[in-house]
Amino acid sequence: MRKSVIMFLILLVAVAGVAVAKDKVYGKGVSEGDVTKISAIMADTDSYQGKTVRIEGTAVAICASRGCWVEISSDLEGQTLRLKVKDGEIVFPSKIVGERIAAEGVFTANHVTEENKVCSHKATQEATGYSCTTSYQVTGTGAVVSFK
Amino acid sequence: MGSFRKVCRWLHRELGFFAVGLTLVYAVSGLAVNHVHHWNPDNTSAMETWSIEAPGLGPTEEITPLVISRLALAEPPKDSWRAAEHLLHVFTRDGTVEVDLNTGGVRRERVTPRPILYDMNFMHLNKGKGVWTIVADAYAVLLTLLALSGIFLVKGRRGLAGRGGVLMGLGILLPILYAWLARG
């Protein structure tokens, strides 16, 4: 009798676990393959530029009004990498903040002004006097969020 | 022509009644998402601040449980993240709690879906994809039928040959003019 009760409880916990931990696929999801650490990508940005990468982390911030980007935490404290998806094609809900996310896409570097506008030709920059910085992102094709 | 007009009237009347619900969803949500630069049409956000005893700048694995216990949240957090040496973010079901480890200052943002409007926007922007794509496509066909059948409802001076025709022309001209001007 006791054995049956224990078995039933184990089964109940397992079922509850399956019910609670729910994976939600966005876009094309994430294909099989090695996950690259965000810290490794950010330490060698030139090598990863234009390459398809799979990354993992916690969703720490999101575009509140459109859900078109998510900041994913790195394995290094304080570091993040932005996952940007095409507006309207994938829309991340605000409830994914704090959840584990795996994502896939192409690592890209954007040359932007302080106002986050795309920088034009270098000669124009010098003539107009504004400065440009490089911001990195993964242009995402898909993601999988593991809801707790 | 008489029976054709009869069919148009029947179509317009029946489909018109059926389209009321979906039209309201798309119209109300359309107004809401048109102004996405001015407000968040999906969620409301409330900010709350208070202080806890400053936890200090210790290692994350030691600081995190200390902060969580001092925050005394109603439910266990989903996760946490050290955003900077002096900042810890604690993620809850309804938002984020940001703790300044130096001062003990706490800033909590609670995000709540707007009642009804959240669901309307979800449908309008087809965030769920899948079966709603079929519904939205069918609704687009339905609107086309409503527009086309509406043209032939009235005959004479108030119809296509008169005032109705002029109004229809203006309605067609408006998007064409805008497209022409917008393209420069």
Image (spheres, coloured by chain):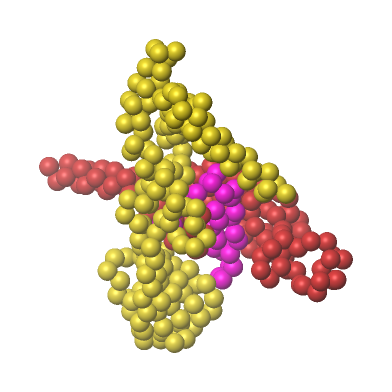
Residue B97 position, x and y percent, is: 40, 72
The magenta span reads A67-95
Q: Locate residue A135 relative to residue B152 in the image: left or right.
A: right
Q: In this view, does A116 lie above or below B103?
A: above
Q: x%, y% of residue A73?
A: 54, 63
The colour of chain B is yellow
Q: Which of B157 and A107 is in front in this view?
A: B157
Nearer-the-camera pick, A1 or B95: B95
Residue in the foreground of this view, choosing between B69 and A142: A142
Please identify the quarter of the rendering in which residue B152 is found: top left
Q: In which quarter of the image is the N terminus of chain B?
A: top left
Does B142 sit above or below residue A81? above
Q: Is residue B10 visible?
A: yes
Asked if residue A77 is among those painted magenta in the image, a careful observer would answer: yes
What hue represents chain A? red
Residue A38: give x, y in percent of width and height: 62, 60
Residue B20 located left or right of residue B124: left
Looking at the picture, does residue B52 appear above or below residue A132?
A: below
Quarter-wise, where is residue A89 in the image?
A: top right
Residue positioned 76% across, 63% down in the render: A119
Q: Does the magenta stretch include residue B77?
A: no
Q: Residue at x 32, y 50 (%)?
A: B116
At horizontal 48% and vertical 32% (from top left) the residue drawn is: B164
Q: Nearer the viewer, residue A41 or A70?
A: A70
The residue that appears at 38% across and 43% down in the rendered structure is B25
